[in-house]
Amino acid sequence: MKLATLTLVLISVLASASAQVLFKLGVSAPAIRAALAEAPLSINAMVSLARSPAVLGGLLAYALAILLWLGALAELELSVAYPFIGLGVALTTLMGVLAFGEPFTATKAFASVLIVSGIGVLALAS
């Protein structure tokens, strides 16, 4: 795998994981929590989400992730590229621990190591 393509993949995964953090920040705001608790699909909830800088930032991060991912897919076999999405799971777990104080259990640690190891094997094989 070319370094430029690997860079596209990794930045795409990072942008996607960052979007999740931004979404979580957005929906954690008291006004949005109240609107979603009242009626998740209501106009009020949708307007609250649309006005949230964190949610909007998350959408922009996802848009960037998609554009980068499309560039990577143009260069890689799908069976080589797609496993890298698993890095997002491990990265999002770590970001949840760091940004929100979520517990980092032995199970999460073990699963993350398995994911990253498996992706490493696939990357080296290609």
Image: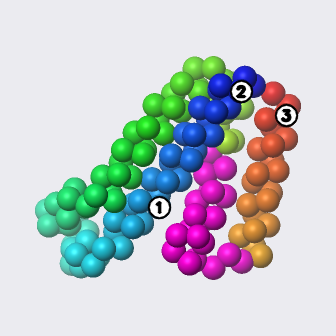
- Total tally of numbered discs in the picture: 3
**Residue 77 in the image: x percent, y percent?**
68, 24
Which residue was labeled with disc 2? 3
- The residue at 53%/53% (across/down) is 17
Q: Residue 124: which numbered mark, if any?
A: 3
Kind of element beneath mark 2: helix
Left or right? Give the position of 92 relative to 126. left
Quadrant of the frame with the N terminus: top right
Q: Is residue 37 visible?
A: no
Instruction: Give the class, few, some or many, for how many residues have Cα within 10 Å of label 2's Cα (few <14, many ≥20).
Output: few
Please name the amino acid that badge 3 sits on. Answer: Leu
Q: What secondary structure prevails in the magenta region? A: helix
Which residue was labeled with disc 1? 21
Left or right? Give the position of 25 relative to 114. left
Looking at the rendering, the stretch of residues picked out in magenta corresponds to 85-105
Whether 86 is among the magenta residues is: yes
Kind of element beneath mark 1: helix
Instruction: Give the class, few, some or many, for how many residues have Cα within 10 Å of label 3's Cα (few <14, many ≥20).
Output: few
- The residue at 51%/74% (across/down) is 100
Look at the picture and state if 75 lies above or below 80.
above
Check contact, mark 2 vs mark 1: CB within 8 A: no
- The residue at 73%/61% (across/down) is 112
